[in-house]
Amino acid sequence: AAVLSSVAQMKTIVETAGRDDLETAASLEELVATQFLRDEGSRFLFHQELARRTIYQNIIPLRRRLLHKRAAEALVTWSESNEQLGTVAFHFETAGESNLAIDYYRQAAATSMTIYAYGEAVERLEKAVALAQDSSDSIVSLPDLYEEIGDCKTITGDFEAAEKAYRMACPKVSADNPLRLAELERKLAATLPPQHREDEAETLYRRVLTRLEKIPPATDMKTRNDTKLNILLGLSDALYFRNQPDAMNA
């Protein structure tokens, strides 16, 4: 049911079906004539949802997964915009291609963020999280996914949900990436003052600063300094809300 140009639509159907252009066109004409499908110009839809569901259920699982994979690959090739990324992700997920599905759900979420559809972005990221949790190959992407959910929740002012997402991300960061963990903990600390927990925020900021000082000098100094600066700014905000100007000055 993807909305595509007529050329892209036909190419997608042809490549998904695995038939040539004439065979596909003849089959579509027959299905429209018998009122199984209706042609809306930008897409073909079943007249009855029950018919679609019955036909789908009668396709054996192996063939079903193959068709979903072909549909995803065809959409990747022929879709003219990023609007189909969520559909691509769904097809890869249903085809059992978890890694590809996670990648496209993240891309779809990023597209949603560009139009400020943060709720939609979170829904797509949560689908990616569910897939990553079930796949040993994809579990390394969990910190990034939780962080992106936390970022969306922070932007929309849902600081409690953002805190929860960042807390899910932190333990999953590799031990050999201390700067990554420090940045996540900085974001986590920033969710606390809006929840009237400035003292907890100060404690966390100071703990992260202490840990930063122990990172070997050979570590990327620019990233380290940028992270430290952002933590100090966040700490200053927490101290401001606690009316501690001397500590802010220090």
Image (tube, rainbow, N blue to C red):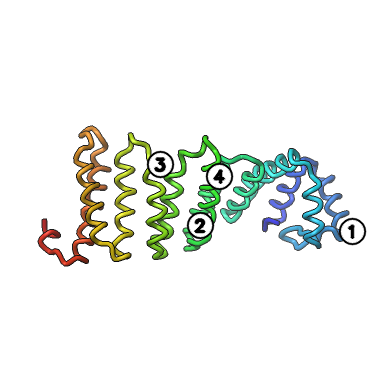
The amino acid marked with disc number 2 is Ala
For discs 1 and 2, the disc positioned in front in the rendered view: 2
Badge 2 element: helix
Counting residues from the N terminus, which is met first, the one under dot 3 or under dot 4?
A: 4
Q: Nearer the viewer, residue 183 or 76?
A: 183
Label 2 crowd (10 A; few <14 / some 14-19 / many >=20): many
Badge 3 element: helix
Q: Which of the image's four quarters has the C terminus?
A: bottom left
Q: Where does residue 40 sit, x and y in percent of width and height?
A: 76, 63
Give the Cα separation between the discs numbered 3 and 4: 16 Å
Badge 1 element: loop
Taking the image as drawn, is residue 75 in sight? yes
For discs 4 and 2, the disc positioned in front in the rendered view: 4
Q: Are marks 1 and 2 in contact (CB under 8 Å)?
A: no
Give the Cα separation between the discs numbered 3 and 1: 54 Å
Q: Which of the image's four quarters has the N terminus?
A: bottom right
Label 1 crowd (10 A; few <14 / some 14-19 / many >=20): few
For discs 3 and 1, the disc positioned in front in the rendered view: 3
Give the Cα separation between the discs numbered 4 and 2: 16 Å
Q: How many marks?
A: 4
Q: Give me the residue at 58% from left, 41% from top.
A: 98
Residue position marked by numbered label 4 in the rendering: 131
Q: Nearer the viewer, residue 208 or 85?
A: 208
236 relative position to 55: left or right: left
Q: Which mark is residue 121?
A: 2
Q: Where does residue 182 sit, x and y in percent of width and height?
A: 29, 45
Q: Give me the residue at 46% from left, 48% from top.
A: 145
For discs 4 and 1, the disc positioned in front in the rendered view: 4
The amino acid marked with disc number 3 is Lys
Counting residues from the N terminus, which is met first, the one under dot 4 or under dot 1?
A: 1
Q: Which mark is residue 13?
A: none
Residue position marked by numbered label 1 in the rendering: 34
